[in-house]
Image (cartoon, rainbow, N blue to C red):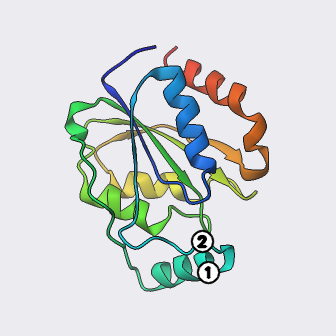
Amino acid sequence: MNNSEMLIIYFSHSNNTKQLAEWIQSKTNAGIIRIEPEVPYPSGYQETIDEMSRQNKGKILPPFKKVDVNIQDYDTIFFGYPVWDMRLPPVVRTFLRDNDFSGKTILPFNTHAGYGTGKSVSEIKEFAPNAKVADAFSVRDSNIKGAKNEVEKWVGTVFH
């Protein structure tokens, strides 16, 4: 598959979601960009949880580093993120809020610690109301290393 009308956008804190994004890219040859918060999340697990909780409770949507991409140039967007507290990470919600996904097909993929996608897909629909949002492809963090074939199979089903 080589389609310049596809883009992979992802946020990854522990590089689990990054791994999935790279496998998707190797299968599709799509462009790829990483969402990065202006102020990085802490590296420690508990500190990250505390910061994410503070942002969620305060309804804080932290800014992200500018990315050099025009989303309007793409029809299909693979959109990757870790599920944090059954939600999209706050910086991912900021990215969705600040970009226009009207008329785009969003193919969510995520990693999680065992509780699944939570309400992350409904949040994508909330922040990108004029996009077509597919069901999420989801991989538990502890299963990442062995998930390449599963990821490639999912990508294959997306286009058939």
Report which residue position mark 2 lands on.
43
**Which residue lies at the image location 39% right of the left edge and 66% below the top edge?**
37
Q: Residue 140 at x, y = what percent?
A: 73, 49
CA–CA distance in space, label 2 to label 1: 7 Å
**Which quadrant holds residue 66?**
bottom left
User: Please, is residue 67 above or below residue 72 in the view?
Assistant: below
Q: Is residue 132 left or right of residue 54?
A: left
Q: Secondary structure at mark 2?
A: loop
Q: Residues within 10 Å of mark 2 (few under 14, many from 20)?
A: few
User: Please, is residue 107 above or below residue 40 in the view?
Assistant: above
User: Please, is residue 89 above or below residue 147 in the view?
Assistant: below
Residue 62's tag is none
Q: Residues within 10 Å of mark 1 (few under 14, many from 20)?
A: few
Q: Residue 70 at x, y = what percent?
A: 21, 41
Marks 2/1 in contact by CB < 8 Å: the verdict is yes
Q: Residue 52 at x, y = what percent?
A: 53, 76
**Which residue lies at the image location 26% right of the left edge and 36% below the top edge?**
103
Front in this rendered view, residue 150 or 36? 36
**Which quadrant holds residue 3?**
top left
Amino acid at pointer 1: Glu
Report which residue position mark 1 lands on.
47
Amino acid at pointer 2: Ser
Q: Is residue 19 left or right of residue 39?
A: right
Q: Residue 119 at x, y = what percent?
A: 55, 59
**Which residue lies at the image location 50% right of the left edge and 85% below the top edge?**
54
**Which residue lies at the image location 36% right of the left edge and 73% below the top edge?**
62
Q: Secondary structure at mark 1?
A: helix
All told, the count of numbered labels is 2
**Which quadrant holds residue 35?**
bottom left
